[in-house]
Image: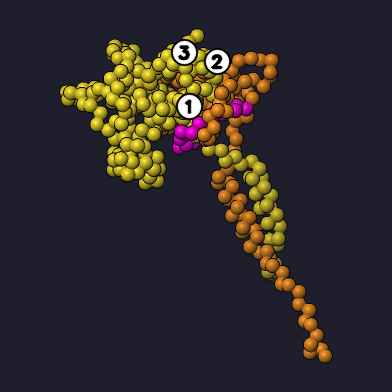
Chain colours: A orange, B yellow
């Protein structure tokens, strides 16, 4: 009878030897694609307006970002401008751009773009003031940061 | 004599370490692509030459602090701007500005109404956006977006006619493989419908 005894053979264990390889592959993907958030917002996070005709900003290293939005403290009215980690005055924008330029190579300066990330409730006056300051120092490439979408109704 | 032991390093915890790192990067990663409407600001120069521009070559868009829009003194909605701007730019009622000694030519690629009371030529058509300091930024971006859309649509139409390929596709091709011929095509389209947007001082 022993001939017909069922052979007790469990499932062979799945080899987990390649698991570290898979995980490492994922790890490298995320390491390469990750961008650490380099600025902490001091102002309230701006709600970007929606636009359909958007262009991607090409060279991330050549972009300097200006944030415009309300203060976190609800009692303080008006638009606040933040660059890097602090709130600045409109007339300090040129010095910010100069500082940004100093970090880049000279031949790259003319490709530098200023990205304005402003809240959709912000006043156009503030934005136009910023644009005027940028014009003064010949930082002519500007991008109004938006989220892509077709629902323009939510903007106003 | 040293003991020669061929002991293997235990690699069992390798996966755990890698997982830990993986989770860290998963959490901290932000894959936001920064996109937006790009604009080139006009250069500031001391000697601005006086140019006379005919009233009919300017499309006046005014927006007040209550986000209400006036186009050529008529009350409109944001969604109307695209059509109005396209009609205005593509009108082609007259001749272009004389260039390099050549006299102006009528617009042979325009599909507009050829209304003599509207713009002469796409190269002469100026869109003026007069905003108030109190206008909200969202409204401002919407208008800019609609103007951009008008130009893109016109370029698209012309591109389909000339090259049987949309302007958007041309731009995409150019980004994938920048060649001289593609650049020439894109520049030609941009030249046919140049973006001329003027933003006067805001109303206080």
- Image quadrant assignment for residue A11: bottom right
Vertically, is B37 above or below A7? above
N-terminal label among 2 and 1: 2
**In the rendered structure, which segment of residues is drawn in magenta?**
A45-61
Q: Position of residue A108 (x, y in %)?
A: 41, 32
Q: Is residue A50 magenta?
A: yes
* Image position of A59 (left or right of B21): left
Q: CA distance from mark 2 to mark 1?
A: 17 Å
Residue wearing tag 3: B202
* Image position of A58 (left or right of B44): right
- Crowding at dot 2, Cα within 10 Å, few <14 / some 14-19 / many 20+, comes out as few
Residue at 66% of width from left, 45% of height from top? Answer: B24
N-terminal label among 3 and 1: 1
Residue at 33% of width from left, 39% of height from top? Answer: B159
Q: Secondary structure at mark 3?
A: loop
Q: Secondary structure at mark 2?
A: loop
Residue wearing tag 2: B66
Q: Main secondary structure of the magenta part?
A: loop
């Amino acid at each position: 009878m022993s001939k017909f005894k069922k052979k007790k053979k469990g499932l062979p264990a799945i080899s987990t030897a390649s698991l570290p390889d898979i995980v490492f592959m994922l790890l490298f993907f995320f390491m390469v694609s990750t961008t650490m958030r380099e600025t902490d917002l001091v102002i309230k996070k701006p709600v970007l307006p929606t636009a359909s005709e958007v262009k991607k900003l090409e060279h991330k290293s050549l972009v300097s970002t200006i944030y415009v939005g309300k203060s976190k403290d609800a009692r303080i009215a008006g638009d606040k401008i933040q660059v890097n980690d602090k709130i600045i005055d409109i007339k300090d924008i040129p010095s910010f751009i100069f500082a940004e330029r100093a970090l880049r190579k000279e031949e790259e300066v003319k490709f530098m773009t200023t990205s304005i990330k402003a809240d959709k409730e912000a006043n156009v006056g503030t934005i136009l003031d910023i644009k005027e300051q940028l014009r003064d120092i010949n930082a002519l490439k500007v991008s109004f940061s938006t989220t892509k979408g077709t629902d323009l109704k939510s903007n106003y | 004599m040293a003991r020669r032991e061929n002991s293997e390093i235990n690699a069992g915890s390798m996966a755990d370490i890698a997982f830990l790192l993986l989770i860290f990067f998963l959490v901290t990663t932000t894959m936001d692509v920064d996109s937006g409407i790009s604009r080139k600001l006009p250069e500031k120069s001391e000697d601005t030459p006086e140019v006379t521009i005919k009233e009919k070559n300017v499309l006046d868009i005014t927006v007040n602090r209550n986000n209400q829009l006036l186009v050529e003194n008529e009350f409109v909605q944001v969604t109307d701007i695209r059509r109005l701007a396209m009609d205005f730019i593509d009108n082609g009622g007259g001749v272009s500005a004389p260039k390099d000694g050549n006299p102006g030519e009528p617009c042979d690629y325009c599909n507009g109404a050829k209304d003599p009371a509207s713009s002469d030529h796409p190269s002469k058509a100026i869109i003026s956006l007069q905003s108030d300091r109190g206008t909200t930024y969202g409204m401002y971006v919407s208008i800019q977006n609609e103007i951009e859309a008008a130009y893109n649509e016109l370029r698209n139409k012309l591109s389909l006619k000339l090259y049987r390929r949309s302007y958007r596709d041309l731009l995409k091709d150019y980004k994938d493989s920048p060649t001289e011929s593609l650049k020439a095509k894109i520049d030609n389209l941009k030249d046919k419908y140049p973006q001329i947007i003027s933003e006067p001082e805001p109303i206080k």
